[in-house]
Each structure stands twice: as structure tokens, then as C-alpha cells.
Image: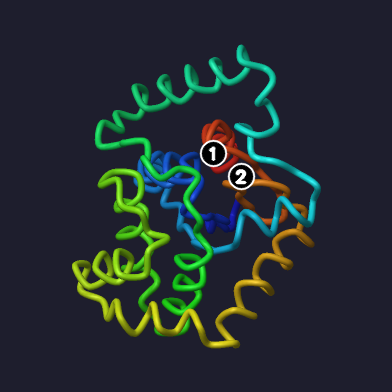
Amino acid sequence: MVTNKTLDFYYDFGSPNAYFAWKALAGVTERTGLKINMLPVLIGGIFKSTNNQPPWMAYSNVPAKLDYERLEINRFIETHKLTDFKFNSAFPVNTLLSMRAAIAAQHADVHDAFYPAVFNAIWEDDKDISQPNVLAAVLTDAGLDGEALVAATQDPSIKQGLMDATAACVARGVFGLPSFFLGDDLYFGKDRIWQIEQALST
């Protein structure tokens, strides 16, 4: 049985699968006592470093594959009762601003309130979080200092922090998102959550 019940969860707000995984893991935490360490990184930087592509680009010439991806998403939504999900009308959303803001939120010790607000804004409320005024308003509505967090995204140390976090996850073996580590074991994708729960009980 796994003794370290902390899961490192690498995420970028632009990944709907990261949203799905975050929502689905709530049940796992209730059943197992798993603690989740949310780690913001930039998916574009991961793709560039690993010569990878998002599915909608990689399979752009394989319509049947994309149709199946949508089918699996709908199945996942139904299984986990994620009825608040709405596909973002600005997809693919540029998340550089929001991911830098996530690093700023870590520095300000408000990340635990920050990331749920932004995940819900993009994948439930159809907000374009690439817009500074929109992101600031979302954070302010969540009780945070939205203007300060958005302003902090221009701080060189915050910019470097996101680059360093992204490079560190790539060095750990991450090639896409969402990715998880339970101890030293890597799990990739929302469809591996059952394996994480299985590992916690065997």
C-alpha cells in the first residue's frame, strides 16, 4: 500500500482534462484521505520542450480520433456528474497570464483559493481568462486581490518562476497535462484516476 498519500498534480487552466481530473479527484480524496498538491505549469512550454502537441492539433487529420475524444469526454462528464462543465468559447485560451498569476498566488500564499476560482471561471462560466480585466474580476469575486495578482504577472521573478516550474516538471518526465505523481510514479491523463485510487489501496 502507498504510504505517502500526497499527489503532485501538474496543471494548466487551458486543459479541460485538467479541470475534469481536478473535479473527479474530489471523490478520491474523500474515500482515501489523499492530499493533492496543485502545481501550476505552462502547457505550451511542456509541448515545446517535449516535441508534443495537444490532441486537437496532433489528430487534426484524423476526424474519427477527434470524434472518439469527444465521446470519451462526454462519458467522463456523465460518469462523474460534471454537469456544470461548459466548453470555453475562446478555446484554445492563452493561459500565460493566468499561469503566471498562479505562481504569484503561490508566493502570496493564496493559491488554494486561486486555482478553483480560475478553473470554474474558464470551464463553468465561459470566461476568457486571457484578458487581464476578466481575470482580475474573477479573482476579486473570489475574495482575492485580483488587481495585485494580475499586476504581479509582470514581475521578472514571477515569469522566471513559471519557466522554472515548467522545466522542473519536464525534467521529471512530464510530456502533457494533466500529469500526476504519487511518490515517484507518473500517471498521465484524467483516465488514470482510477489507477491512482487503486495504488492507494493495494
Q: What number is the disc on residue 1?
A: 2
Label 1 secondary element? helix
Q: Is residue 91 left or right of residue 52?
A: left
Q: Position of residue 156 (x, y in %)?
A: 59, 87
Query: In the rendered image, which quarter is residue 160 located in?
Result: bottom right
Q: Is residue 46 above or below residue 25?
A: below
For the view shown, which residue lies furthest in the top direction?
64
Label 2 secondary element? loop
| Residue located 40% across and 39% down the image | 24
| Residue located 35% across and 59% down the image | 118
Q: Earlier in the sequence, mark 2 or mark 1?
A: 2
Render colour scheme: rainbow
| Residue located 29% across and 76% down the image | 146
Answer whether labels 2 and 1 touch (C-beta < 8 Å).
yes
Q: Is residue 5 left or right of residue 87?
A: right
Q: What number is the disc on residue 201?
A: 1
